Amino acid sequence: MPLPVNPPASPDTLSANARTVLEKRYLVKDKSGKPVETPEDMFWRVATTVAEADRRYGASEQAVYDTAVAFYELMTQRRFEPNSPTLMNAGRPLGQLSACFVLPVADALSNGHDGIYDTLRAMALIHQSGGGTGFSFSRLRPSGSMVRSTTGVASGPVSFMKLYDASTEAVKQGGTRRGANMGILRVDHPDVLDFIACKEDLTQVVNFNISVGVTRKFMDALKADGEYELIHPSTKQAVGTLKAREVWDKMIMGAWRTGEPGVFFIDEANKYNPVPHLGAYEATNPCGEQPLLPYDVCNLGSVNVGYYAQNGSMNWEALRADIRLSTHFLDNIIDVNKYPLPEIDQLSKRIRRIGLGVMGFADALIKLGIRYDSPEGVEFGRRVMEFLDVEGKAQSEIMAKARGAFPEWAQSIWGPDETCARDESGNRIRPMQLLRNCNVTTVAPTGTISIIAGCSSGLEPLFAVAFMRNQAGVMMPDVNEDFVAMAKQGGWYSDELMERRSRIFSARPTRSRPSGTSRCRPRSRSIATARSARRRTSRTPRRSTTCGPSMRWRMISTARV
């Protein structure tokens, strides 16, 4: 029996900006482009679609309805939001609900499976469905190599990355946004210097973030101020050497000038690969937070941490309940998802990877009176992420007992002593734990869903307390809700002040705003340099020279599952 079509009654908590974004990019529209559903309709469409998965595991009609209502309230009350494809596509014919994919690129033009042009086609299908893609181009032979079949020479990884970039430009993602890609090349690939420099011209490869896959051998050479070997991907033989310090300096200079390249500590990530018997990590999703296997996928969603900071303290019990409900939500997506490729569908169900993260972190700190770049801020972040990890896995364990562990569990790092994956020394990597999902947590940037939730992005500091946001072709004033509340409470609020703050997006003390209000709300440009440098390892491309070298940070250095 289908669930009711109309959503349950609920208070209106969405901001004007949220409704604008939803209308422009997410709501179902008729042929003329006019929305035929409200935001509440959309959330109910998503909630009922995702809750239907419970029916497969014996849930009654009433239980499925109750779960749908719980999911609906979770989203409409801005406590949690799933990644954009889920909001766009759930309950619709396309039905593709995931944002993050990695595809393999073999050293062949076409082999009927994962050749360069085979993967190009798969990329286009994923972009059309609203997903983003990551690639390692490290298997491709370097430029100038002999091509035996034609006696010609290979053009190299960068040339084919430009091919993928052009295709991305031509395919508008899901009819709502351009596709996004991550391109990765190992630091020991002979073309690594060309790769590092490929985005010095900001008009080139604009649909890619790029990161260098940094190995332990390279880091050892860097520490010793020595050289390291370049390895031909086909022969696995050394074909030259480079000074590690010179390569590192070029990477640092590129990151400072343009935000590219980032770094992906590939050996460290694979140290915590939960299913190493299925393959190694070679690449990440477009923003770099989630390493994935070839044909791997991750369903992302984020809890709004700021929601639980109330009256100067955290409501940990409410946060616990919503972490568990959100984990349930993300696991259900795996069962109701319509994946664009059979290889992705099969692997997703074998390992059931999900990525629950946070947003509104800066908001929580402000409400608690903690400065972002203080030791107390760091400790609060550590506590929040430990809480998210422990409670997310607790729910995954509950679901594993009720529905079964992910099929590859026994040979994973979580499996029993007799069959689990082990490190090079034969030691366990993680304690045994029965889990429904091989991976549970991932901190994503939450660019658009944080607008819907009306909170700060991911775990980043505030960009500014007030600024004009260009989103979906509309200029929208974005004023921090806590800043407005503080202004009204202090008696110095005015519409003129808010508009002025929005247009100059600065928060230096003025006669209109007491200087003490900035103590707990540093913006991204004023974070202590030494501490912020320690916590970030790679960055997304620069979008505006007024915002410093980069507006947003990719944060992949290790993969903790």
Image (cartoon, rainbow, N blue to C red):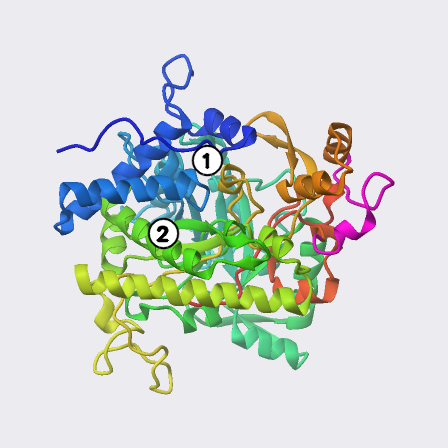
How far apart, in angstroms, are the residues tagged by discs 2 and 1?
Answer: 35 Å
Task: List the residue tagged with mark 1.
Answer: 167
Q: Amino acid at mark 2?
A: Ser
Residue numbers of the magenta segment: 504-521
Q: Are marks 2 and 1 in contact (CB under 8 Å)?
A: no
x then y, percent, for residue 204: 61, 40
x then y, percent, for residue 426: 33, 86
x then y, percent, for residue 9: 35, 30
Q: Is residue 176 above or below residue 537?
A: above
Question: What is the quadrant of the N terminus in the image?
Answer: top left
x then y, percent, for residue 141: 46, 57
Instruction: Answer yes or no: is residue 340 visible.
Output: no
Task: List the residue tagged with mark 2.
Answer: 326
Q: Quadrant of residue 70?
A: top left
Query: Could you say which disc has been placed on residue 288 in the image?
Result: none
Q: Amino acid at mark 1?
A: Ser
Q: Is residue 513 magenta?
A: yes
Residue found at x 27% / y 46%: 112
Q: For the residue carrying disc 2, how many other residues have a C-alpha within 10 Å: few (<14), some (14-19), or many (20+)?
A: many
Considering the numbered disc 1 on the image, is that residue within a helix, a strand or a loop?
helix
Q: Is residue 232 left or right of residue 378?
A: left
The secondary structure that most of the magenta stretch takes on is loop
